[in-house]
Amino acid sequence: MSKCLFKRYKYLLVLALFCVTFILLIPKYNNTINDELKIHYINVGQGDGILIQHNGSNILIDGGPIDSSNMLIDYLTKNNVKKLDYIIATHPHDDHIGSLPYVLNYIKVDNFLAPKITSNTPTFVNLTKKLKYNNLKITPISAPKTVNLDENLTLNFISPKEISYDNINNYSIVLKLNYHNFSFLFTGDAEKEIENFLTSSNIDLNSTVLKIGHHGSKTSSTENFISKVNPKIAIISCGMGNDYGHPHKDVLKRLNNHNVKTYRTDKDGTVLVKCNKTNLKVLLEK
Ligand SMILES: [Zn+2]
């Protein structure tokens, strides 16, 4: 290239370099602004329904009872959920899977995870029909299993093991979500036998936020388990004036003794936890 030609193209070269640098920076910038995690502990009445959103991915852990179906679908739509990357059905009880057949009617689902346990309830039969209709197979979960959703977000499945339990609640999928310095433990309806197993194993249970097991029933949340998880925040998902007396006063007292800030969907409505790399905040519906 002659000196004269170089002079002529110098500005074009600078412009091209600027464009390339800008294009290379775009994904990094987008990652920074989208790297927010939202966990919605949805007020589904007496049951569990939890939506996790991060970087355009959506995960639903349980969906609440059948009578929360319309509300749940409205909530998902309002929160721009056009597709669920994962549904995690913790165990086949109606207060967890009741609305899932209806979710499958309205929203595309990529993966359906559940423990290796079936049920003969009409809800479970309906759910398996809907899964078949949608060409979806249940991916059985037996711990330990890890799913890396992206470089900042990991799901660690820590229960159930591949053994038989007398109580369906103890088949509950228990998973720990790790995101930067924060962690979230989801326990389904796992009871004290599972909590005892987890505390006696060398699994790191320490979590920032704990979804209290079995709607705050006294069958879960042992002293030792709360100590090992050592949560800053606890969330109890239960219906207002429910017939089971959830949450039990002993569980509330235990959480209070450990200085755990406790939210309840029956009193606070949907609890939304938002966090980025360094900050976490809790937003209440009521
Ligand atoms: Zn339940």
Image: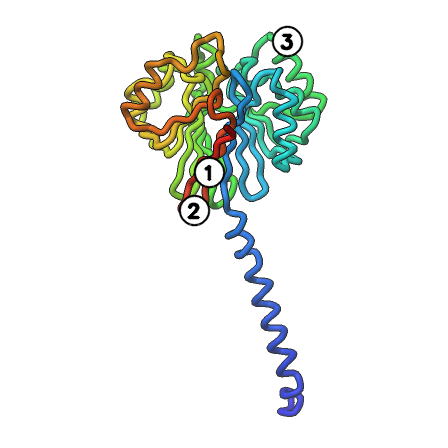
Disc ID at residue 167: none
Q: Visible in this render: residue 12?
A: yes
Question: Which is closer to the viewer, label 1 or label 2?
Answer: 2
Residue occupying image coordinates x 44% and y 16%: 214
Q: Earlier in the sequence, mark 1 or mark 2?
A: 1
Q: Earlier in the sequence, mark 3 or mark 1?
A: 3
Q: Is mark 2 within 8 Å of ligand 1?
A: no
Residue type (three-letter) at the residue carrying disc 3: Pro
Q: Residues within 10 Å of mark 2 (few under 14, many from 20)?
A: some
Location of residue 277 with respect to 119 vertically, above or below: below
Image coordinates for residue 280, horizontal then vertical, percent = 42, 40
Callout 2 secondary element: loop
Q: Residues within 10 Å of mark 1 (few under 14, many from 20)?
A: some
Query: What's the distance in space between the residues labelled 3 and 1, CA to CA?
Result: 34 Å
Residue type (three-letter) at the residue carrying disc 1: Thr
The one nearer the camera, 20 or 72, is 72
Q: Residues within 10 Å of mark 3 (few under 14, many from 20)?
A: few
Q: Visible in this render: residue 204?
A: no
Q: Quadrant of residue 86?
A: top right
The one nearer the camera, 111 or 25, is 25
User: Which quarter of the rendered picture does the N terminus lie within?
Assistant: bottom right
Disc ID at residue 122: 3
Circle 2 sits on which residue? Answer: 277
Disc ID at residue 154: 1
Residue type (three-letter) at the residue carrying disc 2: Lys
